[in-house]
Image (cartoon, grey):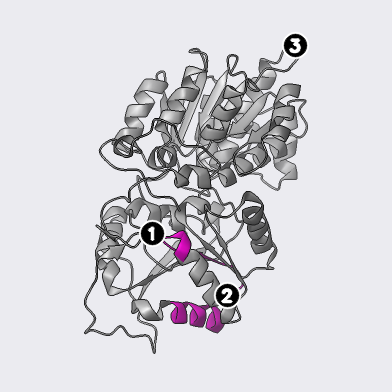
Amino acid sequence: MSFESLGLRAELLRAVSENGYSTPTPIQQQAIPVILEGRDIMGGAQTGTGKTAGFTLPLLQRLMASDQPVKGRRPIRALVLTPTRELAAQVSESVETYGRHLPLKSTVVFGGVSINPQKQKLIRGVDILVATPGRLLDHAGQRSVDLSRVEILVLDEADRMLDMGFIHDIRKVLALLPKQKQTLLFSATFSKEIKQLADKLLDAPVLIEVARRNTAAESVTQVVHPVDKTRKRELLSSLIGTNNWRQVLVFTRTKHGANRLCKQLCSDGIVAAAIHGNKSQGARTRALADFKSGQIRVLVATDIAARGLDIDQLPHVVNFELPNVAEDYVHRIGRTGRAGNEGEAMSLVCVDELKLLRDIERLIKRDIPKVVVDGFQPDPSIKPEPIQNGRGRQQKAAHKPAGNRSAARGNGQRPSGNRRPGNQGRPGNRARRSA
């Protein structure tokens, strides 16, 4: 199948070709025709499957089809909500890339940067707005945004927005939108809570799921290296140096852990940078750009900060610490092996994390090969200790960490003022702690 066969207009086909693509991915093959028909969809796809282009291309075409001359400020006709700054920037870049030959205007708004330049762009008028929930509500409160004429709403990575406790902000945004609109909901996983949200938002949606629920990318080679906790950094440095890895994304559980590991790697002569919610948007953008260009060899990230990172042909992902929530393992390793490329995901697992590992293997329905690296055999006399959360408290490995307001601030969004710890995130669970 070709992009031409999907019914896209010439300007979009030209942009796709200029971007080096000729064959649509499975999610694009299934989603584009349905969206062009004006149907609501509930789309499930792993990262790296071409999901963003899957909704951006038909969105642009539908806006062109309904485009009419307007007097005064252009109304916002399409709204894309994302959970993090990085993902918002990525989606905005896709809109600009694929819409470069169309007269449509777009912009992106998120926290962590000055609101005034964003207000000026909004006041001049845009057709497409990409936003994080908190900053969008800031603009609504300052009357710099009018959402009453939105024709298409996209909720991207809806599962992460629920995990991060943004359901209240999403409901506030929905109250500002017209009832009649096309809604496209995308989620890496279809939990019970996501289905409940979809039932309220979508009108007779078409279900599009190109990967089994909570499965890891088939193009990613997975391995576990058992090692004592105190020797993890030594093993990581050894793996990077021995194998001459030039681009490695490393995950830690906490912001403090990311900073500490980054300093340790730099002391080993390995150029590294950390990216997490406490970093300014400018620092995060620079670190990611330097990583992509090869100036930085290792990018150490937390789960929330890494959500939405789009790095072409990333060869290596390392779980320095396993995530507390098994689903996050799938998201992490999905950073590599994207769009058909091969990738490698390694997890450095100490005795404290064996239960987390069992949870992951149960989720992905497979055993991950265990390979002990010579010289780093675990000490069998060491007994497991409780997993510690970001503030040094004991935490049950199988449960999600408690939410707090810094998760929202750290990702460019403000928390809802009336939010209580008991109602954050998914019903029955407490929202994930800031990363």
Q: Which residue is mark 1?
A: 390
Residue at the image point whose x is 55% and y is 73% from the top: 263
Q: Which mark is residue 260?
A: none
Question: Which amino acid is tagged 3?
Answer: Val
Q: Pinpoint residue 39: horizontal percent, then vertical percent.
A: 49, 21
Quadrant hosting residue 228? bottom left
Q: Earlier in the sequence, mark 3 or mark 1?
A: 3
Q: What crowding class fits label 1: few (fewer than 14 Cα within 10 Å), some (14-19), or many (20 or more)?
A: some
- Residues 235 and 364: in front is 235
Residue behind mark 3:
70
Magenta range: 233-256
Disc 1, SS: loop
User: Which amino acid lies under the numbered mark 1 shown in the image of this protein?
Assistant: Gly
Disc ID at residue 245: 2
Q: Is residue 230 left or right of residue 37?
A: left
Instruction: Return the residue found at the far bottom.
Output: 375
Instruction: Check disc 3: other Cα within 10 Å, few if <14, some if 14-19, many if 20+.
Output: few
